Image (cartoon, grey):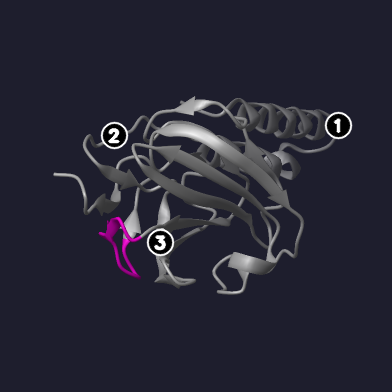
Amino acid sequence: MIVITGIYYALGLAGAGALIAWLANPWFSAPLWLLAAFCLYFFRDPERAIPSGPVAVSPADGKVVAVKPEGPSLNRISIFLNVFDVHVNRTPIGGTIAKVEYQKGAFHVASREECSTQNEQNVVTVKGDGTTVVFKQIAGLIARRIVFTKKAGDRVATGERIGLIKFGSRMDILLGPEWQIAVQPGMRVAGGSSIIARRRDRS
């Protein structure tokens, strides 16, 4: 499956390439056709097997770049998405979206630590099954367009699609002490199917 945005981009680039090929030389249109093909690849949206049970799943494909305390009682997991990763985002847990807050900011390279607080981001709070999880869609140097398809009050299932970030980005997840972290820096994770944490207070 491909996100509809990617199809629009690909059609536009392919059309421009066809026009150049007609007006000039087909070789001149090759870069545009390659970009059209890359857009179809970039905006791919594969189906994922969502784990069951009291777990939190990765909200994105990418590499875990940080697992560290955040304040007195939270732990933060940071995931960096390069341009070759799937960029469709998913909710880590099921429940109700309690709050959505968009914060303007900088566009530093998304793998840098300061991105968690300084970069432009969409902060989403989900409450469900006695826990609250916050995750952040964070724009990067190239990714300057965050898409979020839900709103406060919506019910979501674990691993449900909630939006995307275009062209390289970062996702942060904030988890309370009731969660046992199941990943470490350097690990690759897949959105919706990789377990990043398990509930300590659930069997």
Q: Residues within 10 Å of mark 2 (few under 14, many from 20)?
A: some
Please tell me which residue is depicted at 65% across the width and 30% down the height of the picture: 5
Of labels 3 and 2, earlier in sequence is: 2
Question: The residue tagged with tag 1: helix, strand or loop?
Answer: helix
Question: The residue tagged with tag 3: helix, strand or loop?
Answer: strand
Q: Quadrant of residue 9?
A: top right
Left or right: 32, with 164 as reference point: right
Residue 101 on image: x %, y %? 67, 46
Q: Is residue 63 above or below residue 193?
A: below
Q: Which mark is residue 50?
A: 2
Residue 176 on image: x %, y %? 38, 58
Gap in Å between the C-alphas at discs 3 and 2? 19 Å
Q: Amino acid at mark 1?
A: Leu
Left or right: 95, with 180 as reference point: right
What's the magenta region? 177-187
Q: Amino acid at mark 2?
A: Ile
Q: Amino acid at mark 3?
A: Lys
Residue 22 on image: x %, y %? 80, 28
Instruction: Let me know if residue 45 appears in the view.
Output: no
